[in-house]
Image: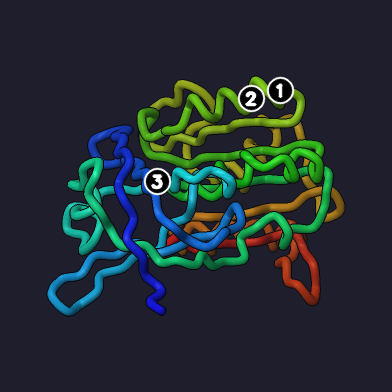
Amino acid sequence: MSNWVEATVKDIKWWSETLFSLTLNADIAPFKAGQFTKLSIMDGEKRIARAYSFVNAPENPNLEFYLINVIDGLLSPHLAKLQPGETVLIEQRATGFFTLDEIPQSDQLWMLGTGTAIGPFLSILQQPDVWQKYKSINIVHGVRFNNDLSYQALINELLRVYPEQLNYIPVVSREEPLQGLSGRITSAIENNRLFDHANLQPTPNNAQFMICGNPQMVKDTTNLLLAKNFTRNRRKNPGNITVEQYW
């Protein structure tokens, strides 16, 4: 049986000129929050496919993906033109280990993401397990401009429901932030501004880090945390740093 099934477009929401969310309905296998699947189109006999993380909670039948429209991209411009009722192909089974059951229990959970890589964190935050497993949850979203901070309604609802547990910290690099910090996530870690802002001091004994974004950001952030004596998290040797590269 083919790994690919047809998905019907339910909605497309534009957050800015380049950022949009695509909501699909499809008969796929169950997935875990934090996992990703692939969307694809056929170009003649050639399949063009890319991996995207789910934004929606696993129990939600509306499959939501947060994308950037790369003008010269092979797939995203096609996805950006889709209209409700049209179809796209989706891989039936999700994959990935960027999930809560892979992260050790701790007092603090830090979710560090850039751009559309906030998607899997939003899926995880819509699960009850995460609020029972960690006392303090800090979602840190690195963007270039303030209007790149999408999903504010969902984030504000989470802040309303979990005001004592959740910190939301935008980090804006190319203009003065309306909230949060200026610069990049890496610099905010390096000079401790991030942790000072949250009024928390993570240590290898009390904190877990999940990092998702472009490969250079993931690498640089990981190296900064390693220099602070945090360790990579592996099944055979649990540590503090769990990563997902977003392309």
Residue 234: image tag: none
How far, Cα to Cα, is label 1 from label 2? 5 Å
Above or below residue 63? Residue 13 is above
3D distance between C-alphas at marks 3 and 2: 21 Å
Label whose residue precedes the other's in the sequence (3 or 2) = 3
Badge 1 local density, few (<14 within 10 Å), some, or many (20+)?
few
The kind of secondary structure element at disc 2 is: helix
Question: Which of the two discs, 1 and 3, labels the residue nearer the N terminus?
Answer: 3
- Residue 53's spot in the image, x, y percent? 47, 55
Do the residues under discs 1 and 2 have CB atoms within 8 angstroms?
A: yes
In the image as oriented, which residue stretches furthest toward the right?
205
Residue occupied by mark 3? 66
Q: Which residue is mark 2?
A: 159
Residue holding disc 1: 163
Residue 50 lies, in percent from the top left, at 34, 65
Quadrant holding the N terminus: bottom left
- Residue 19 % position (x, y): 31, 41
Q: Amino acid at mark 1?
A: Pro
Q: CA gap, disc 1 to disc 3? A: 25 Å
- Specify the quadrant of the image occupied by residue 222: bottom right
Marks 1/3 in contact by CB < 8 Å: the verdict is no
